Image (cartoon, rainbow, N blue to C red):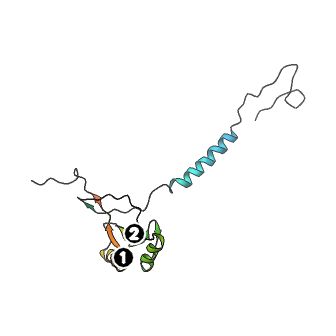
Amino acid sequence: MAFSTGGNGWGGRSRGRLSSMSDINVVPLVDIMLVLLVIFMITAHVMEFGLEVDVPRVRQTKDSAKDLPVVTITKNGELYLNQDPININVLAGEIRKRFAGVHEVYVRADKDTIWDVIAQVISELGEAKLAVNMVTQPVDEAERPRQQ
């Protein structure tokens, strides 16, 4: 906080000279920085993409740029349809409702997921006449042991 000594109390002229304020007011700068910090902290976790699922690795992979529904199955057997939790009983109907005209679905399952849940999801999608594409990761050739 800056103040002047003497004068008329308005910080005006004092004996013919102009008084100047030599301190910088940093309160607005600190306020702005704190607001930006809070905004960054709130949105940082939102920028993370998707659910953490460790899919199995295979040699052959296929890339697709189509916008298709993705059913994700976590280690605990929880189901998600494109980031939204979903019940297996309404899975096929919800896919038909959200993605009109789609005839195929990607299924991402953690490699440690019990097979029973995966089989039930595939069966449910098969009954709805939807083709199932399993999502995998390519094998890194540097990690594979050499066979002689």
Q: Who comes first in sequence, dot 2 or dot 1?
A: 2
Which residue is at 43% across, 80% downward? Answer: 89
Residue 107: give x, y in percent of width and height. 35, 68
Pick whichever, 110 or 71, lies toward us: 71
On-image quarter of the N terminus? top right
In the image, which disc is placed on residue 125?
Answer: 1
In the image, which disc is placed on residue 111?
Answer: none
Residue found at the very far right of the displayed protein: 8
Which residue is at 37% across, 58% downward? Answer: 65
Contact (Cβ within 8 Å) of mark 2 with mark 1: yes
C-alpha span from label 2 to label 1: 10 Å
Q: Secondary structure at mark 2?
A: strand
Q: Is residue 30 left or right of residue 73?
A: right
- Which amino acid type corresponds to the residue marked 1 in the rendered image? Leu
Q: Relative to 141, say whether 81 is above or below.
A: below
Residue assigned mark 2: 71
Which residue is at 35% across, 80% downward? Answer: 127
